[in-house]
Image: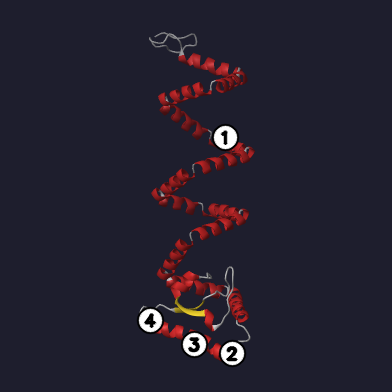
Amino acid sequence: MKTCKNGHNLTLENTKCKICIKDYSRKHYLKNKNKIIAMQKERREKFPDKVREITAKYYLQNKDKICAQREKYKSENFDKIEARRLELYNKNIEIIKARKKIYYNKNKEEICKKSSDYYLNNRDKVKQRKSNNKDKYCKKQKEYRIKNAEKIKKRKQHYRLKNLDKISKKESEYREKNKDKISKRQKKWREKNPHAHTILVAKRRSKKLKATPPWLTKDQHDQIKEFYILAQELAWLNQDGKPFHVDHIVPLQGENVSGLHVPWNLQLLPAQENLKKRNKF
């Protein structure tokens, strides 16, 4: 068997030693690295389409080989790659954010669909990952909420105004299905936060008192009481067992206008409808 001048074996087909050529190429590259990089950059700028075409063609022809080389390099130089990536990210953080934002706005529907599909297909995997990194996720979310409090508030308000009927329906259905759960949660909260509960009750009472005009007669006060008595009686008579609420037609704490706590501003409504109505007029 033939050998080269450095003692490497040569096959019949190859008259040149591949190992020697590879070593020479490597040495030549290291010796002229800056010059070669500058030439490559110049060529890319001068012939971008041609370079892209050649690169794509080479990748398709040697896909498995390239992927294997990349994986091997990643596994051998993981810490080095992460350190370099972090350094580049911190150095170009504003440019990266701007680029991501442009790309997201351009491909919003596609990205949302992909995210949704991935979550639906890998729900257990995502939950497991979150549970394994719970502290990290919570910390990240908390930092984001603090940093973007106003932005989040505006987004929620905008979404609520846009989907008011949908949200009201959803909340109503949830309340119907989870009455006991909500009741227990509220009770637990009242026991845990007695002062906060007292403040809320006092606030509501003071609103009602301020909304009750001093010129109301005794008969009119009795009429108000009758509404509350009637609400209890209707709840007892109702076969479904669903309660009735005394509702203020013009809410006491309306968004644009506030009503009075007077007989002609009261009406009886099923609890579900009253909760759905909220402070709307």
Residue 65 shown left or right of residue 101 in the figure: left
Check disc 4 and report its element: helix, strand or loop.
loop
User: How far apart are the alpha carbons under marks 2 and 4?
Assistant: 32 Å
User: How far apart are the alpha carbons under marks 3 and 4?
Assistant: 18 Å
Above-or-below relation of 137 to 49: below
Marks 3, 2: nearer the viewer: 2
Residue 281, given in percent of the width and then of the height, sits at: 53, 70
User: How far apart are the alpha carbons under marks 3 and 2?
Assistant: 14 Å
User: Mark 2 is on which residue type?
Assistant: Thr
Which residue lies under the disc numbered 4?
A: 238
Q: Are marks 3 and 2 in contact (CB under 8 Å)?
A: no
Within 10 angstroms of label 3, few (less than 14), some, or many (20 or more) residues? Answer: few
> Which numbered marker is on residue 217?
2
Check disc 1 and report its element: helix, strand or loop.
helix
Above-or-below relation of 192 to 61: below
User: How far apart are the alpha carbons under marks 1 and 4?
Assistant: 73 Å
Name the N-terminal-most of marks 1 and 4: 1
**Could you tell me which residue is drawn at 56 percent across and 54 percent down?**
141
Q: Are marks 1 and 3 in contact (CB under 8 Å)?
A: no
Which residue lies under the disc numbered 3?
A: 226
> Which numbered marker is on residue 43?
none
Check disc 2 and report its element: helix, strand or loop.
loop
Residue 139, given in percent of the width and then of the height, sits at: 57, 54
Above-or-below relation of 42 to 168: above
Q: Are marks 1 and 4 in contact (CB under 8 Å)?
A: no
Residue 31 shown left or right of residue 16 in the figure: right
Name the N-terminal-most of marks 2 and 1: 1
**Could you tell me which residue is drawn at 44 percent across and 69 percent down?**
175
